[in-house]
Image (cartoon, rainbow, N blue to C red):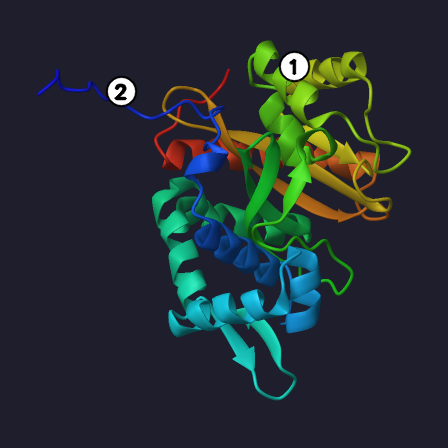
Amino acid sequence: MGPAIKRPRGRPPAVLKTPVASVVQSLDRALTLIELVAQSDGIGLTTLSQRADMPPSTVHRLLMTLAAHGFVEMHEQDQRWSIGVEAFRAGMAFQRRNNAVTLGRPVMQELMELSGETANIGIFEGGEVVFVTQVESYDPIRAFFRAGERRSAHASGIGKAMLAHMPRETIERVIQQKGLPAFTENTITDPTSLFIDLENIQQRGYAIDNQERNLGMRCIAAAIFNEFGEAVAGVSVSGPASRLSDERIDVLGPQVRQGAAKITRLIGGLEKA
């Protein structure tokens, strides 16, 4: 026998991608279908086949397997597929693991009541913001983010709040990988302007999305920190620009910052000065 192979210890670097040769094709396809079904409120087989770029027969076979395990389900009335209860149960495991989501919920409720606007918590993943939980405003005209929805960090209040507390090299890597695409005329698309904005965010303690992702919507956000003082999440309030005037933001900004600091304390995090 040859010498024992030494396996690397610890967690593999996040930047490493799974080699294509090691991907199990059927599993990869099944996970793609789960993602596509989760993005819709019900989707037909033909549309799903087109979006997944797979033959309908293959899609149907995989869906039946996923349905047998409760990850998707089909509505007999209209023959449309939607996400199943087991996918929800699996997703809840993330919330149990992420203290900011579970412990931050009461703070989100307080911010919603205080501001009258929708409160959100998002995390930074893969160079983007992923919204993980929300407390909706009672107002019929309000901001809405689907749980699991991704947004470009540079055009998101939560994204900028977190970027402002990350090393410059991390921000530069995000810019290199994701770019700074324009979504509205207000989107920051120049790296120099972005770094200036991030410096201002760090100084005042909260970020502002000034209609940078969607015209007519504004957002105020602040970062949540872990025990090492690293920005691991962000909390925000979002609503129509007509209600979130500059004067209103001046009042709500410090309150959102205080809410983020409260969640930081609840999860045992280290507050930034």
* Kind of residue sitting beneath label 2: Pro
Q: Position of residue 268 (x, y in %)?
A: 34, 30
- Mark 2 = which residue? 8
- How far apart are the two marked residues, 2 and 1, measured between alpha carbons? 28 Å
Mark whose residue sits in front, 2 or 1:
2
> What residue sits right under mark 1 in the picture?
172
Image quarter of residue 258: top right
Give 64 or 138, whichever is nearer the viewer: 64
What amino acid does circle 1 point to? Glu
Quadrant of the rendered image containing residue 247: top right
Q: For the point 87% across and 37% down, which residue is it?
A: 184
First in sequence, mark 2 or 1: give its number.
Answer: 2
Q: Which residue is drawn at the image coordinates 44% and 62% (left, top)?
A: 87
Q: Horizontal and vertical percent for residue 86?
A: 40, 66
Q: Is residue 169 visible?
A: yes
Does dot 1 land on a helix, a strand or a loop? helix
Image spot of residue 177 (x, y percent): 66, 23
Give the crowd class for mark 2: few <14, some 14-19, many >=20 residues within 10 Å: few
Residue 188 found in image quarter: top right
Position of the N terminus by quadrant: top left
| Identity of the residue drawn at 69% across and 58% down | 51
